[in-house]
Image (cartoon, rainbow, N blue to C red):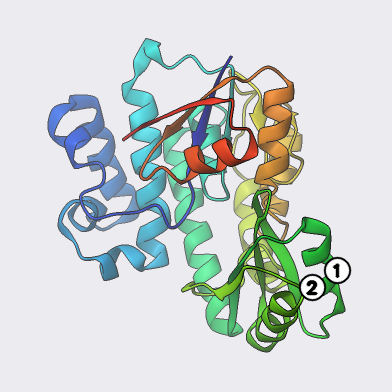
C-alpha cells in the first residue's frame, strides 16, 4: 500500500519548485494563484531568493506547502494514495492532497498559521533542542522534572526527539539530558517553542480560522500528528488540526500505525528527504522514495 508523506518546516531550499513552474502549465497557474492569495510574489523568493528570505516564517511555511501540494496535484491520475500524513506543517499539505481541504483554503490557513506562530514567538523568547540516543521515556521524565516550560515536541524516530520550551527551561533540560547519557542535546536555530504550551496564543488565533473553513471527507485516511490514527471524519480532522500547534508531533507513532495498517511504500512529496530518512529509522524494511 502506498503512503504519501509531506515534509514540514526546515526542508526549504532556494530554487524549490522552479522546475515544476517552468515545465508544467497547471503548476504555473497554481503558483501564480498563490502569489495573488498571499499578496506578494512568493515564487520570486522560492526560485531566486536567499536562504534568509526563505527562513522568514511567513515565507517558509507557505513555500513548503506550495511545493508539496502543487507536486501532488500535477501527478493527476498517478496520485493514488492509500493513506497520507504530514509532519507538522506537512499535515496541511496532506489534507489538501487528499481533497479534504481546498488548495486556496489550505494556503490561507498555512499563511495565517505562520503569522500567528511568528507573533507567539515574538511574545515569549523560547526555543527547541534536538535530543539524540535516549529512550523517549527518559526524555519525557527529564522534561517533566524542569520547573520551566519544557515538553517533548517532535517524536521523529526512535532515539531522536525534539524538545520545546522557554530558553532557561531548554538550557536546564539539555544539561540534564547530557548527564543522563544523551549523545547530543543541541539547541536548534528556530524562532520559538513550536508544539508547546507557549504556542497557545497562536492556537487560539488559528482555531477560529480552522472552524470557519470547510473540511470534507478525504479520499483516503489521513494519519494526523495529534491522534497518530487514520482519520476520515471532518470534525475530528478539524479538532486535531486545532490541537496540533500546542501538541507534540507523534511522527514515530503515526508511521508505525501506517505500517501496521498495511503501508509498505512511502513516497515523500516536497523539498528535501528528511521524512524518507525517518521512515527508514522507524522500520528499515520499508521502501521509500522522494519526489521534488
Q: Which mark is residue 143?
A: 2
Q: Position of residue 66 (x, y in %)?
A: 36, 42
Label 2 close to label 1 by CB (< 8 Å): yes
Q: Nearer the viewer, residue 260 or 23?
A: 260
Q: Nearer the viewer, residue 48 or 207?
A: 48
- Left or right position of 280 against 230: left
- Left or right position of 226 against 283: right
Q: Which mark is residue 212?
A: none
Q: Position of residue 8 (x, y in %)?
A: 49, 50
Q: Position of residue 125 (x, y in %)?
A: 58, 85
Occupied quadrant, residue 50: bottom left
Query: Circle 2 sits in a helix, a strand or a loop, which is it?
Result: helix
| Count of numbered labels shown in the rendering | 2
Q: Nearer the viewer, residue 11 or 265?
A: 265
- Left or right position of 74 against 197: left
Please name the residue that numbered disc 1 is placed on. Answer: 141
Q: CA distance from mark 2 to mark 1?
A: 6 Å
Mark 2 nearby-residue class (10 Å; few <14, some 14–19, many ≥20): many
Q: Is residue 251 above or below residue 164?
A: above
Occupied quadrant, residue 279: top right
- Tell which residue pokes out farthest to the bottom in this image: 168
Q: Nearer the viewer, residue 212 or 12?
A: 12
Q: Is residue 109 above or below residue 275?
A: below
Q: Position of residue 211 (x, y in %)?
A: 67, 46
Residue at 74% across, 79% down: 179
Query: Circle 1 sits in a helix, a strand or a loop, which is it?
Result: helix
- Tell which residue pokes out farthest to the top in this image: 77
Q: Is residue 1 above or below residue 117?
A: above
Residue at 55% across, 67% down: 117
Mark 1 nearby-residue class (10 Å; few <14, some 14–19, many ≥20): few
- Left or right position of 29 against 204: left
Amino acid at each position: 500500500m502506498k503512503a504519501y508523506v509531506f515534509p514540514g518546516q526546515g526542508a526549504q531550499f532556494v530554487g524549490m519548485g522552479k522546475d515544476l513552474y517552468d515545465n508544467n502549465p497547471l503548476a504555473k497557474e497554481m503558483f501564480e494563484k498563490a502569489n495573488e492569495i498571499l499578496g506578494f510574489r512568493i515564487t520570486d523568493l522560492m526560485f531566486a531568493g536567499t536562504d534568509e528570505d526563505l527562513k522568514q516564517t511567513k515565507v517558509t511555511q507557505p513555500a513548503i506547502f506550495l511545493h508539496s501540494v502543487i507536486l501532488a496535484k500535477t501527478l493527476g491520475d498517478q496520485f493514488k494514495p492509500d493513506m497520507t500524513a504530514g509532519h507538522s506543517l506537512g499535515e496541511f499539505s496532506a489534507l489538501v492532497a487528499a481533497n479534504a481541504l481546498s488548495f486556496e483554503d489550505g494556503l490561507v490557513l498555512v499563511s495565517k498559521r505562520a503569522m500567528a506562530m511568528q507573533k507567539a514567538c515574538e511574545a515569549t523568547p523560547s526555543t527547541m533542542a534536538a535530543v539524540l540516543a535516549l529512550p523517549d521515556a527518559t526524555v519525557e521524565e527529564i522534561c517533566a522534572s524542569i520547573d520551566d516550560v519544557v515538553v517533548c515536541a517532535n517524536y521523529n524516530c526512535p532515539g531522536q526527539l525534539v524538545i520545546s520550551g522557554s530558553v532557561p527551561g531548554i538550557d536546564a533540560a539539555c544539561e540534564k539530558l547530557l548527564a543522563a547519557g544523551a549523545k547530543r542535546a543541541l539547541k536548534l536555530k528556530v524562532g520559538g517553542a513550536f508544539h508547546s504550551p507557549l504556542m497557545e496564543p497562536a492556537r487560539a488565533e488559528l482555531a477560529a480560522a480552522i472552524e470557519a473553513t470547510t473540511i470534507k471527507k478525504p479520499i483516503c485516511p489521513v494519519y494526523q500528528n495529534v491522534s497518530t490514527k487514520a482519520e476520515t471524519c471532518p470534525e475530528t480532522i478539524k479538532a486535531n488540526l486545532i490541537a496540533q500547534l500546542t501538541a507534540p508531533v507523534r511522527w514515530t507513532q503515526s508511521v508505525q500505525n501506517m505500517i501496521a495498517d498495511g503501508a509498505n511504500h512511502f513516497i515523500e512529496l516536497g523539498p528535501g528527504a528528511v521524512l524518507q530518512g525517518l521512515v527508514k529509522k522507524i522500520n528499515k524494511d520499508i521502501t521509500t522514495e522522494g519526489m521534488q
